[in-house]
Amino acid sequence: MGNKGFRKWVAAAAMFFWSIAAWAEYKLNLQTPNTRLGETIYDLHTIITVICFVIFVGVFGFMFYAVFKHRKSVGHKAAQFHENTAVEVAWTLIPFVILIALAVPATGTLITMRDASEPDLTIKATGYQWKWGYDYIKGEGEGISFYSALSTPRAQIDGTDIAGRNANPNYLLETDNHVVVPVGKKVRILTTAADVIHAWWVPALSVKQDAVPGFIRDAWFKAEKAGIYRGQCAELCGKEHGFMPIVVEVMEPAQYTAWVSTQQKKVAAAKVDPGKTWTPEELKEQGGKVFAQNCVACHQATGMGVPGAFPALNGSKVVNGPKDDQIKLVLNGKQGTAMNAFKHLSDVDLAAVLTYTRNSWNNKTGDAVAPAEAKALR
Amino acid sequence: MYAAHTNDHGHDEHSHKPSGIMRWVQSTNHKDIGTMYLWFSFAMFLVGGAMAMIIRAELFQPGLQIVKPEFFNSMTTYHGLIMVFGAIMPAFVGFANWLIPMQIGAPDMAFPRMNNLSFWLLPPAALLLIAAQFAPGGGAGVGWTLYAPLSTQAGPAMDLTIFAIHILGMSSIMGSINIITTILNMRAPGMTLMKMPLFCWTWLITAYLLVAVMPVLAGAVTMTLTDRHFGTHFFNAAGGGDPVLYQHIFWFFGHPEVYVIAIPAFGVVSQVIPAFSRKPLFGYASMVYATASIAILSFMVWAHHMYTAGMPVEAQLYFMYATVLIAVPTGVKVFNWVATMWKGSLTFETPMLFALGFLFLFTLGGFTGLVLSIVPVDIQLHDTYYVVAHFHYVMVAGALFSAFAGIYFWLPKWTGRMYNETLGKWHFWLSLVFFNVTFFVQHFLGLAGMPRRIPDYSLQFAEFNMISSIGAFGFGLSQLLFLYIVIKTITSGEKAADRQWEGADSLEWTHLPSPAPWHSFETPPVVK
């Protein structure tokens, strides 16, 4: 190799490393973990991958050596050896030992990962088709409860607002309400679901736990740094599976305390006077909001549903029929279909959304469902 | 025997075959049935492939451009079902039909009429899967795993899918009984079990796996059916059931199913690599034992597909240890193949290229499998594109590449004609490059946090998805070249020699002409 050849080689190597630098913009590895446990898992993944890579290079080093040196076209004559007990025992035992070496650290990490005891804060995450509900069950903030749904505008998704989508760094990873937790505290997440299986997943917090209807599972994390961490539902849960993100906001303790008090004030302020009489107009207005949060994904804003899959409410016999039948259907759901029970809605919300459907689009029943009527049928 | 039989093959006294379409409908001949299995599987490969193209077209860019989410979910579901049950499994049953009687020195399969039935159950099942797309509400967008309770709330397409799976299961069980009986009872004198070509061994083991697990799947989908229509609550917590029960039953079938697909692929590669190395398989006996160990272990690891579903930590530990153990016999196989090539006299015709592609990429898929077996790491990667990449390395670069290797290898024997070597090599290199463009980048997507089965994704995943889609279109188009090569071979290929490959030493090459006669061995050969 002359001087010229050498320089060429250096240039090629430089090109190669430059191209790796250019690849830095592409995410090639796990997200940067924000928990101690996450760092352990990150390292565990690195170790396994490196070990696999070394073995891979070793084994295929042999193969490619054979491919280039033991080919007929270079005149190599086939040896006829086969079977060799020593070699065969070696290549059975050596991998076995390597696997044990891998399993040991993995065991320790797993046992830590599954120990959700003595949490500082317990939050229940409930999967719904297709949003999450959160209840702060124990610890600072106890009693706070809210739903959290995708807040990316529909226009960005369906392509009517492509510019908006391209300018949105959190496209599909943003919600109307964040799950707020304090930094440095052990947060236990209880997962469950109301309809089908979902999975609560935030990569940077190293938590992924299925939410199984009728059962409670748990997982935990202790965030190291404040910030906003985003994840998604990780178990196929139907049509809008790709559109029910999870956003966790980790706050400094003082900020968290402030957040808790505003939330609690909001809850107090929003507490509806049970004696309040709702006018049909108020119910319909409130019902529109409830519809947008709970019903629109299937029954559509036009009330036309999706032919074959989700029935139209516009002109529906049930919606235009007796109130009691419609209340029962929404309360209990319809077995064997995607229409789930909506028992979790309050009497007012239930009455409001029914009033809305009975008096929207071409439906003009002219009546209103009173919260008391919904309550009576529970 | 048949009303409309002709006897134009005068040289072959036993060819009582009707002509035209009835030859195929009524066929009890292992070669005709093998041919039908292979063409059927290729047709399904194109249907499943078209679905993959729709998936990749939608994922080409962020946003919902082409299809609605519910249709997208249906595509991922039926792409999986059709590729697994319609394309890959029947392809290897086609190989079994063609090759087992020839390789053990038998005239045909043990139960020729049952053989006919097990093939002809497939088209109705395929029609049900396709018809499901047109059921009210469209196909069932529940994933190929058909998890409850999503499957109990799906539309009527789900019922069609359940019946299709019942029929496919019956077909598989009958085919397996036939294979087991043929291998155990119809070997030529002197052909002891430990002298059989490895392909026969892998199918013997696979057939036992199928007989064991297909009824389990049938049970799982039947429970889904009764939950849907007859008021049972197997998978409904409100009625005392448990949705996770479905997953346990499904994966008790599902993990052995992975090996139902992989083990015959091992068998094909174990024929091809020694032939082109001109050297016997390094460790025949250890290959047989390794295959059997893999099959037995496959029954004990099912819950590694459900580490996030919730189970006691002790159970997670057990399933992790059992799963990593599979790496031992799998490693033995890989080492054996490499040792077979070592100091051989290698040539690189298309079958060998595909076998090496298999070896290289299947091993890569095996390593990502090892990464996924470690519970804490799997919990990060479960249900992401990392998993999608992993199983496509095993299923496409593994099973499909091995099937291509087998088809190029035996096509001269089956048709009596040679394929075009240049075009075959083009097919290999195009498939290899586009396969990796499609699936290698999906590892990165999964690591960065992109869930699988989503029709739209956040912008950080845009670049790799576009690369992956371009690869997928290229891979899809490359397979049309394969169709062209096969048709051209059948219609106008050059005449093949009886022993086309000098290194091939099983009975079909050493004792039978090309193309192989209607009945393989009317008088059994004597094997020394």
Image (cartoon, coloured by chain):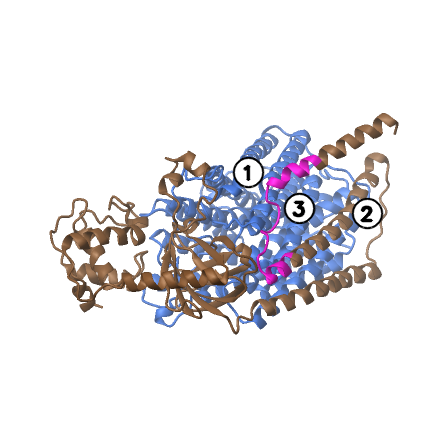
Chain colours: A brown, B blue
Please tell me whether mark 2 or mark 3 is closer to you in this view.
3
Q: Distance between the residues labelled 3 and 1?
A: 23 Å
| Chain letter of disc 1 in the image | B
Decide whether the magenta segment is chiefly helix, strand or loop. Answer: helix
**Residue at point 60% right, 47% down?**
B443
Residue range corresponding to the magenta coloring: A18-42
Kindly tell me whether residue B14 is visible in this rendering: yes
Q: Badges 2 and 1: C-beta atoms under 8 Å apart? A: no
Compare residues A307 and A28 and report the one nearer the observer. Answer: A28
Compare residues A238 and A293 and report the one nearer the observer. Answer: A293
Which amino acid lies under the numbered mark 2 shown in the image of this protein?
Trp
**Residue at point 52% right, 48% down?**
B450
Q: In which quarter of the image is residue B504?
A: top right
Marked residue nearer the N-terminal end (2 or 1) = 2
In the displayed orientation, state which residue is furthest to the top: A4
For the residue labelled by badge 3, is the local secondary structure a helix, a strand or a loop? helix
Residue B361: image tag: 3
Q: Residue B264's x, y, as percent?
A: 63, 52
Please tell me whether mark 2 or mark 1 is closer to you in this view.
1
Compare residues B127 and A50 and report the one nearer the observer. Answer: A50
Q: In which quarter of the image is the N terminus of chain A?
A: top right
Q: Quadrant of the C terminus of chain A?
A: bottom left
Residue B374 as seen in the image, left or right of residue B218: right
- Residue of label 2: B342
Which amino acid lies under the numbered mark 3 shown in the image of this protein?
Leu
Q: Is residue A33 inside the magenta stretch?
A: yes
